[in-house]
Image (tube, rainbow, N blue to C red):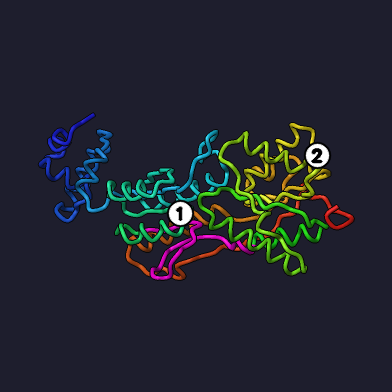
Amino acid sequence: MSTIKEIAKSAGVSPTTVANVIHGNFGRVSQATRERVERVIAEEKYAPNMGAKILAQSSSRIIGVIMFMEPRWEESVLEDPFSSAILGAMERDIRDNGYFVMLHTTSDEDEVLRLSKAWKLAGLILVWVPGDVCRVIYDTIETPVVFIDSYFSDRDHVYYNVGLQDERGGYLITRYLLSMGHRNMLFLANTSLFTGGDDARFKGCQRAFLENNLVLSDACYHALDREKKVREKFYLSCTDSSNPCTALVFSSDYYAAEAVSTFQDHGIDVPSQISVTGFDDNLFSRLVRPRLTTVHQNASEKGRIAVSMLMRLINKKSVSPPDVRLDVHVVVRDSVKKLEHNGS
């Protein structure tokens, strides 16, 4: 591959001029010279060193995407269709805006701050960050930041966030289950670490119960374990003859589909023996049998809106409203049985 000196010789300019063209310092180069250098670069198939470009420019044109989560021990984050949909939409829009993506997964607050400072990021998108961490990030870094699915613990700052009407989602799916005769149900949260969305969805479940003069106690909230074997053991315990539970309300399609598969492996029929609902309406909800009744959300739209917000912040344009919460609705499929008598 040609060097900058060789390109300079072919174009009849100095190496400094070639470096200015590569690094986008066009104010120091005439249009004709720029075009001549770019033509030689294309002919030589020259690939500039990204590290050198980052050092030479005030912006790296890199957008950091950090998913704040504990990865499951058995799978990577990209194996979950929900995460893939968000990331796919963001990568496409970031690329279309002339930027690059740096992806990282962590649940370490200090690591988020280290990454944000170590890289000359043009912008940062943080997914599922808990409220207390949001404030530390806001007070520590100057990089434009947009959050996805975050809940905030203070009102002192303006946070740019794309989320979901989580409470409404929990309310709608529970109202449907109640209409199908279910009174004894468990809510299965995605994690015990970062509970903003899960908590909001469970509050929606409780609101639906109250509207029917019923009570869904806090004891019906269960956070799932990271280890698959532990989760599977819990799913099976929900069908024990001593357990009056008739429906499992999952906070994600991923775990709902996992539970349905576990039941099938042990000869337990869904929904005749136990009903199951999900949340997301992703690929798993449509491929598993029986197909999942679930709460629909548009994960790709979240990613697109987050990138649009971030680009406006990078270009110092106003963003309104700063906190967008997308709507949800119930998708009825095959995983819920209608009970003839309340809870029996």
Q: Residue at x 36, y 63 (%)?
A: 313
In front here: 93 or 168?
168
Image quarter in which the N terminus is found: top left
Query: Which amino acid is tagged 2?
Result: Asp
Q: Which residue is tagged 2?
A: 269
Q: Residue at x 51, y 52 (%)?
A: 194
Q: Residue at x 48, y 66 (%)?
A: 323
As helix, strand or loop, the secondary structure at mark 2 comes to loop
Q: Quadrant of residue 224?
A: top right
* Above or below: residue 222 compared with residue 77: below
| Residue 140, image x, y percentages | 30, 58
In front here: 198 or 2?
198
Q: Quadrant of residue 7?
A: top left
Query: Bounds of the magenta span?
Result: 145-168
- Label 1 crowd (10 A; few <14 / some 14-19 / many >=20): many
Q: Which residue is tagged 1?
A: 129
Q: Residue at x 63, y 50 (%)?
A: 222
* Above or below: residue 276 compared with residue 44: below
- Label 2 crowd (10 A; few <14 / some 14-19 / many >=20): some
Residue at the top extreme of this rendering: 1
As helix, strand or loop, the secondary structure at mark 1 comes to loop
Label located before the other in sequence (1 or 2): 1
Residue at the right extreme of this rendering: 340
Query: Which amino acid is tagged 1?
Result: Val
Residue at the left extreme of this rendering: 14
| Residue 324, image x, y percentages | 51, 65
In front here: 21 or 327?
327
| Residue 289, image x, y percentages | 74, 40
Q: Is residue 161 magenta?
A: yes
| Residue 215, image x, y percentages | 73, 63
In front here: 316 or 218?
218
